[in-house]
Image (cartoon, rainbow, N blue to C red):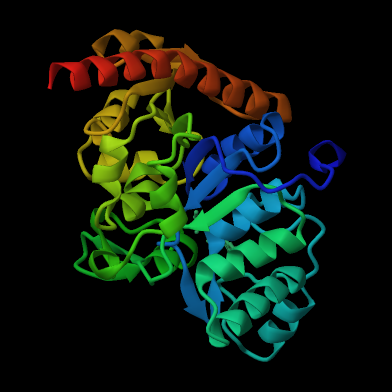
């Protein structure tokens, strides 16, 4: 990935903030990373998918973003590293070990390094910054919290299933009745994230096309986050992860059907209604645009190629730019009126 290798730039304050889960979110984050100057992008990542496996701390969404931004991601699987080898997993299988969660050899090094550093007393934010630094990524990437928040799936059969068991082991098959984010109530949001929301350097906030229920909601469940997004001085826009009645990838649409939520972009916009200033939906859903009460942008949101990622990133930023002028005017007149 020659084109995203940059010269060593001086670390600066970010201007654009993205909220991201794993695969879908990382695609748009990569577009933003490629078109922005080094260090202009900050990404807050879901850690509700994190879990302990073989005594190691696995952070799937953080790692998907790390591999994506460093150009080392496995594009076929959507997770893990390109050109991965599987000697550890094969040997584990021979020994009768648990292999439902596939850990590649190089990927394993990341989990070992993270776990070791956490054991030495470092925070997840510090460990993450360190890993991204070693992979020469020039973006601020912050786990949503340094405290454990764990997404639990409430299944119709009465079970409470930890996220990775639901997603990987049970292949998203159990019918869902709801979600819980254990630990969220006691967690603190990442401090840099919260500071940035008040920083005049910030121009835009983009909620990536991630699963609202299990990738973005864990962040919003942390006390103070939702209110801070609502109060923020810059436009908050979201990109719909639903296109033409289906999710591009993952169980979002299946979950919506099971929860009796209409599978369309309107449901997504409504889900974020209290803090959203603008919404981006795909050309295929143009007919929904007039039903929304906030400004919309209809464009191609399906990101198959690198050019698609860049184009959606550009569209998102120019849409936010337009909204920013309006939001500044409204804020100024509201201040004058009070
Ligand atoms: N997803 C799978 O579907 N199967 C796996 O075996 C698997 C292993 C894995 C290992 C490390 C890692 O960082 C991610 C991994 N994922 C795997 C992806 C991950 O569990 C999900 O994509 C996310 O949690 C959903 O965003």
Q: Residue furthest left?
A: 338
Considering only vertical position in the picture, is 31 above or below 74? above
Q: Which residue lies at the image location 77% right of the left edge and 44% below the top edge?
A: 9
Residue 6: x and y, percent?
82, 42
Q: Which residue lies at the image location 39% right of the left edge and 64% below the top edge?
A: 163
Instruction: Quadrant for the N terminus, please.
Output: top right
Residue 206: x and y, percent?
46, 33
Residue 194: x and y, percent?
38, 51
Q: Is residue 292 left or right of residue 110?
A: left
Q: Quadrant of residue 311?
A: top right
The residue nearer to you, when weighing 240 against 177, is 240
Q: Quadrant of residue 107?
A: bottom right
- Residue 305 visible somewhere in the drawing: no
The residue nearer to you, when weighing 316 against 108, is 316
Q: Quadrant of residue 239?
A: top left
Instruction: Quadrant for the C terminus, please.
Output: top left
Q: Is residue 106 left or right of residue 231?
A: right
Considering only vertical position in the picture, is 188 above or below 17? below
* Ligand 1 in which quarter: bottom right
Residue 47: x and y, percent?
45, 61
- Residue 299 visible somewhere in the drawing: yes
Q: Is residue 67 left or right of residue 154?
A: right
Q: Which residue lies at the image location 69% right of the left edge and 54% below the top edge?
A: 67
Q: Which residue lies at the image location 60% right of the left edge and 21% below the top edge?
A: 314
């Amino acid at each position: 990935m020659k084109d995203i290798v940059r010269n060593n730039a001086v670390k600066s304050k970010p201007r654009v903030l993205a909220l991201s889960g794993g695969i879908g979110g990382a695609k748009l984050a990569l577009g933003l990373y490629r078109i922005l100057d080094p260090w202009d992008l900050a990404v807050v990542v879901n850690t509700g998918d994190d879990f302990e496996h073989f005594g190691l701390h696995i952070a799937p969404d953080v790692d998907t973003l790390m591999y994506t931004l460093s150009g080392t991601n496995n594009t076929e699987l959507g997770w893990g590293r390109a050109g991965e080898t599987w000697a550890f997993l094969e040997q584990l299988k021979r020994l009768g070990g648990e292999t439902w969660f596939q850990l590649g050899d190089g990927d394993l090094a990341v989990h070992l390094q993270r776990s070791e550093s956490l054991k030495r007393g470092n925070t997840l934010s510090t460990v993450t910054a360190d890993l991204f630094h070693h992979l020469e990524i020039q973006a601020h990437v912050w786990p949503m919290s340094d405290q454990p928040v764990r997404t639990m799936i409430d299944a119709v059969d009465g079970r409470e299933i930890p996220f990775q068991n639901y997603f990987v082991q049970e292949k998203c098959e159990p019918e869902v009745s709801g979600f819980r984010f254990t630990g969220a109530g006691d967690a603190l949001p990442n401090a840099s994230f919260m500071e940035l929301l008040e920083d005049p350097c910030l121009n835009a906030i983009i909620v990536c096309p991630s699963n609202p229920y299990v990738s973005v909601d864990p962040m919003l469940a942390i006390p103070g986050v939702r209110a801070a997004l609502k109060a923020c001085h810059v436009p908050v826009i979201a990109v719909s992860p639903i296109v033409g009645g289906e999710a591009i990838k993952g169980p979002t649409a299946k979950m919506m059907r099971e929860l009796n939520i209409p599978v369309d972009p309107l449901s997504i916009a409504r889900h974020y209604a209290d803090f959203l200033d603008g919404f981006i939906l795909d050309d295929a859903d143009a007919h929904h645009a007039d039903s929304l009460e906030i400004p919309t942008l209809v464009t191609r949101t399906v990101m198959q190629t690198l050019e698609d990622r860049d184009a959606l990133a550009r569209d998102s930023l120019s849409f936010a730019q337009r909204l920013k002028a309006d939001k500044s005017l409204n804020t100024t007149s509201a201040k004058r009126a009070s």
